[in-house]
């Protein structure tokens, strides 16, 4: 079934200006302009981020919606798919973000605009723990794109967390998945959006 509504969730300190989000948005605008696309700027609070997503996508159809998430956005994408159904693509997804982000508590800068500062609070770690996604009832509805060359997250941990999902394990690459264009066709095919 073709995806009619697509949500993209960026990673920690990232934004809708993520090159993966921009590349996917440009492809949709050119080839599938009828697809509803939303890539929000997520607030630092995980609870607020998920509340915003839940509210904005409440009317989206369950069967033809999909979510793509990268890094922390991949963790969020698993939460969203678990709550609302649809297909899910995770790109180098965070598995234990409360553990991994504990050292980042404090004032930080945004990746795409270092003049933008925000506070990442200790209570956000509890919010991440509280929303830990369950093992998906339908793992076949998830595509996990995982780079062995990820310099921030362990590909073995990511692969184990997404056991049963369709797995695209990449030799090399990096956390940002700089070779995203090489994997875009597989992503589009999984979402039934391909040419």
Image: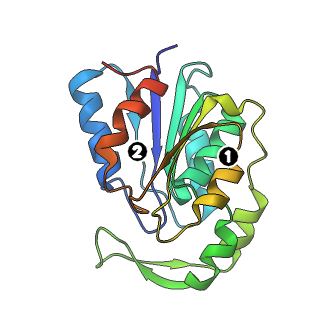
How far across and how far down the image is residue 22, in percent? 28, 46
Vertical comparison of 185 with 192: above or below = below
Residue 152 falls left or right of residue 124:
left
> At 61% across and 27% down in the image, what residue appears?
86
Q: What residue is pinned by disc 1?
A: 162
Residue 157 falls left or right of residue 32:
right
Vertical comparison of 115 with 52: above or below = below
How far across and how far down the image is residue 96, in percent? 68, 65
For marks 2 and 1 on the same chain, the one whose residue lies earlier in the sequence: 2
Circle on res. 39: 2
Q: Kindly tell me whether residue 127 is visible in this rendering.
A: yes
Q: Secondary structure at mark 2?
A: loop
Dot 2 surroundings within 10 Å: few (below 14), some, or many (20 or more)?
A: many
Q: Secondary structure at mark 1?
A: loop
> At 75% across and 38% down in the image, what residue appears?
136
Of labels 2 and 1, the one closer to you = 1
Vertical comparison of 160 with 104: above or below = above
> At 37% across and 40% down in the image, what residue appears?
183
Nearest to the observer: residue 8 or residue 159: 159
Nearest to the observer: residue 66 or residue 143: 143
How far across and how far down the image is residue 149, in percent? 45, 63
Dot 1 surroundings within 10 Å: few (below 14), some, or many (20 or more)?
A: many
**How are the residues colored?**
rainbow
């Amino acid at each position: 079934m073709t995806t009619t509504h697509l949500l993209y969730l960026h990673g920690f300190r990232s934004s809708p200006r993520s090159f993966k989000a921009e590349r996917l948005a440009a492809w949709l605008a050119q080839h599938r302009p009828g697809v509803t696309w939303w890539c929000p700027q997520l607030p630092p609070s995980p609870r607020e981020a998920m509340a915003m997503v839940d509210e904005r996508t409440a009317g989206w159809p369950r069967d033809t919606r999909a979510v793509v998430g990268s890094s922390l956005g991949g963790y969020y994408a698993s939460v969203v798919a678990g709550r609302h159904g649809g297909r899910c693509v995770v790109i180098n997804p965070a598995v234990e973000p409360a553990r991994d982000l504990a050292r980042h508590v404090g004032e930080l800068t945004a990746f795409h605009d270092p003049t933008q500062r925000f506070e990442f609070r200790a209570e956000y770690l509890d919010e991440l723990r509280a929303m830990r996604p369950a093992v998906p009832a339908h793992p076949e509805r998830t595509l996990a794109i995982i780079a062995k060359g990820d310099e921030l997250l362990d590909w073995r941990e990511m692969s184990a967390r997404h056991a049963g999902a369709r797995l695209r394990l990449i030799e090399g690459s990096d956390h940002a998945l700089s070779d995203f264009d090489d994997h875009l066709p597989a992503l589009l095919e999984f979402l039934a959006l391909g040419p």
